[in-house]
Image: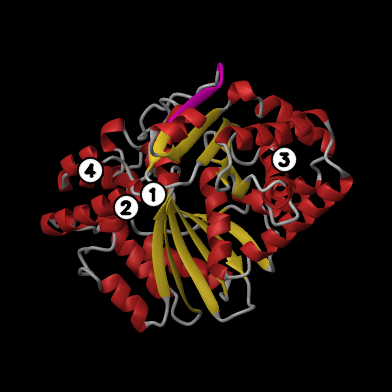
Amino acid sequence: MNRAQTKTMSKGSLCGATISEHRLRNGLRVLIAERHLDPVVAAMIFYRVGSCHEKPEEAGLSHFLEHMMFKGTAQLGKGEVDRITTCLGGSNNAFTTPDHTAYWFELASDRWESALKIEADRMQGLLLDPAEFEAEKAVVLEELAMGLDDPWRRLSRAVQEILFGRHPYGRPVIGYADILHRAGPAEMREYYSRFYQPANATVVLCGDLNPSSALKQVRKHLGGLQGDFDSDAAPYRPAPPEPDGECRVQLSWDDPTARMIMAWPTTAVGTDVDFAFDVLTTILTAGRLSRMYRSLVLEKGLATSISTSNDTRAEGGAFWLYAEAAPGVNPADLESAIDAELGQLHEHLVRPAEMKRAKALLIAGAAAEGETVSDLAEHIGGYAMDADWTLTLELSERRKKVTANALRSVVREYLGSQRRVVGWSLPGGADAENKA
């Protein structure tokens, strides 16, 4: 019998949901979040495999495999997953990140078990029909080409490659065209067999359900699946490099807009530094009252847009700053103004009013993340994959504890000019490049 070995790591309330963790004999982890606000259940399955787990010659295989998971199994033909979901009145989708791949269903609470049947079939019954493989390869290659036809994506890719060096985080999740062209069904099947196993997966069920009954359903459909997952299956990954000086990259684009990205390496998800950067990005660019938006866009008119992102992952992270120069503005002037704003953070403590506003916005944002059962399931599962799902119970308190002194220390340690990569995408033509 495949009885669940229940291990409750923590049990608490998050956005009105009570969460518990269970482990089946085959290694499958199950997270159940009970919440009865709406008669809906989100059923997600996460695999700890993303672009970070690919060998260089496998770049893009995780994302391509995500596509193929909808193209036919031993039990379900091409298009059947979507047809069944539509007939049940629900929705489904999937996504790939550097650290994990996830598949989700949102269905009414009287029919969500169908998602488990589908996922059990897809975990070990994928066909990888050669004709379907080649047809979907063309779709992925077109998606890749469309991404390269975007100035922001081209620039961020160039900055990312420098920022993360030899670590796989430096590669785009979608991969490279030359590698994808060479990929075949046999290569993908080996990759699928390597990572799509119960012991490398986490099921997250969230919504209007009974935890005991839900666990029985998981055991019924997924508990009998077996595998021999090797926790060392992923290739060696060198640590992201510590910068030894500012690096700069310049591209050109055939339009009149000057775009800039600054990026600094930071830390993995779940650290005190991670939470400090959550507060910082909110202070700098969240809304019209944020520090940089108010100064550089509204008051000085140097930029048409400015934003920041705290991008922490399982094995490292980055703090990103994006800015678009206003028409007629010298790119050097915008960069100098941004440097001046960063200099203020190095020298002076953030005012109490700014800290209060930022933390209030973060609390509101955390509530919004749990507004739907699918958002909540994705939130819990993402932390479960990349760090520890119990961090979701601590987010608000950890962010509240960030002080102005701690924020300044983090800025001084991580956001120095000698640690950053600066990328510019400038209008085509010699005049624009000489001005920059």
N-terminal of the two: label 2 or label 3?
A: 2
- Which amino acid type is shown beneath numbered disc 1? Asp
N-terminal of the two: label 2 or label 4?
A: 2
Residue 203 as seen in the image, left or right of residue 245: left
Compared to residue 246, the image places residue 389 above or below, namely below
Q: CA distance from mark 1 to mark 3?
A: 31 Å
Which residue sits at x=66%, y=25%? 416
| Residue 384 drawn at (x, y percent) | 55, 49
> Any mark on residue 276, and which?
3
Of badges 2 and 4, the one in the foreground is 2
Neighbor class of circle 3 (other Cα within 10 Å; few <14, some 14-19, many 20+) is: many
Q: Is residue 52 magenta?
A: no
Q: CA distance from mark 2 to mark 3?
A: 35 Å
N-terminal of the two: label 1 or label 4?
A: 1
Element under disc 2: helix
Which residue sits at x=18%, y=43%? 181
Q: Where does label 4 land, which residue?
A: 180
Residue 134 as seen in the image, left or right of residue 57: left
| Residue 392 drawn at (x, y percent) | 65, 53
- Which amino acid type is shown beneath numbered disc 3? Ala
Q: Where does label 2 land, which residue?
A: 146
Neighbor class of circle 4 (other Cα within 10 Å; few <14, some 14-19, many 20+) is: many
Compared to residue 53, the image places residue 97 above or below, namely below
**Contact? badges 1 and 3 (CB < 8 Å):** no
Q: Where does label 1 land, which residue?
A: 150
